[in-house]
Image (cartoon, helix red, strand yellow):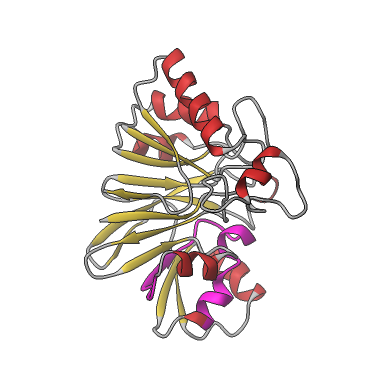
Amino acid sequence: MNLTFLGTGPSTGIPKKECRDLTCQEARKKNSKSKRTRSSALLKANNFNLLIDCSPDFLQQVKQERIKKINYVIITHAHRDASGGIKKLNLWTKNKIIVCCQKQTIKKITSRYGGLNKLEFRAIKPYQKFKIKNMAITALPVKHYVLDEKNFPTLAYKFKNLIYCSDVIKIPAKSLKHFKNYPYLILDAAMYFNRQFISHLNTRQAIELAEKQKVKNLYLTQIGHSYPPYKIARKEIAKFVKAHKIKTKVFLAYDGLKIKL
């Protein structure tokens, strides 16, 4: 099984329109790893493709990675950066696609976008173990948009050796126990080091969480505008890891990065 980071950016993407700071200038250069579309990933198994979140940048992402078919989709939550490409997906696909997410997420998406005739929505519940083909997945509730959790409940997804947790500020104890000693964790680190935000972790918090849970490999995603350009951020993260004797291997994800699981 292989995973491709289709997008690793925040809700606005990087570069921001008309922004001229160092990160956005760098992001406008050809093949820059500072350029980030909104966060999404593709899991490629032997006989199917599974999309994790469907961002407004969906068409750009599938074109970039030359993806011809999506078989299944799982959605973390109903915010537009995670689900705003659903209408585009429905128009793009030639085949029927099964979309799995929480009942409230389905309600939000279908009320926002009509005519999703090629998508079959299936509701999943918190802590439910479900299967897509022969792939076992567990839905792990996490805290993200604490101002309105009722309408925007959020999930992380646990696979055989990977947990995908792209939008989070706090992880309940019942969910957190699943993270212990996990081989791969893809985790929200939207804010840079000591920056704070009500609905996202920062770099330090993400690294310390992974280290405490003895995660083997941590990939930081949802990378926000507070980060410096990719090369600078990568060096500063490596310096932090060395200074604090972090045993978890820490990687700064970028659009197009592929990992073999």
Residue drawn at 57 percent across, 35 percent down: 201
Compared with 248, 134 (above or below) is below
Left or right: 41, with 229 as reference point: left
Magenta segment boundaries in residue numbering: 67-91
Q: How many marks?
A: 0
Where's residue 6, x and y in %? 46, 57
126 sits left or right of 153 in the view: left
Residue at 55% across, 53% down: 30
Q: Residue furthest right?
A: 18
Q: Is residue 160 above or below residue 219?
A: below
Which residue is found at the position 55% from the left and 36% from the top?
A: 170
- Camera-side residue of 245 and 181: 245
- Foreground residue, 227 or 143? 227
Is residue 133 among what the camera can see? Answer: yes
The quadrant of the rendering that contains the N terminus is bottom left
Q: Say which quarter of the image contains residue 185.
A: top left
Q: Which quadrant holds residue 211?
A: top left
Determine if the magenta segment contains residue 70: yes
Q: Image check: 75 left or right of 20?
A: left
Left or right of residue 194, residue 178 in this image: left
User: For residue 87, which quarter of the picture?
Assistant: bottom right
Image spot of residue 151 (x, y percent): 64, 58
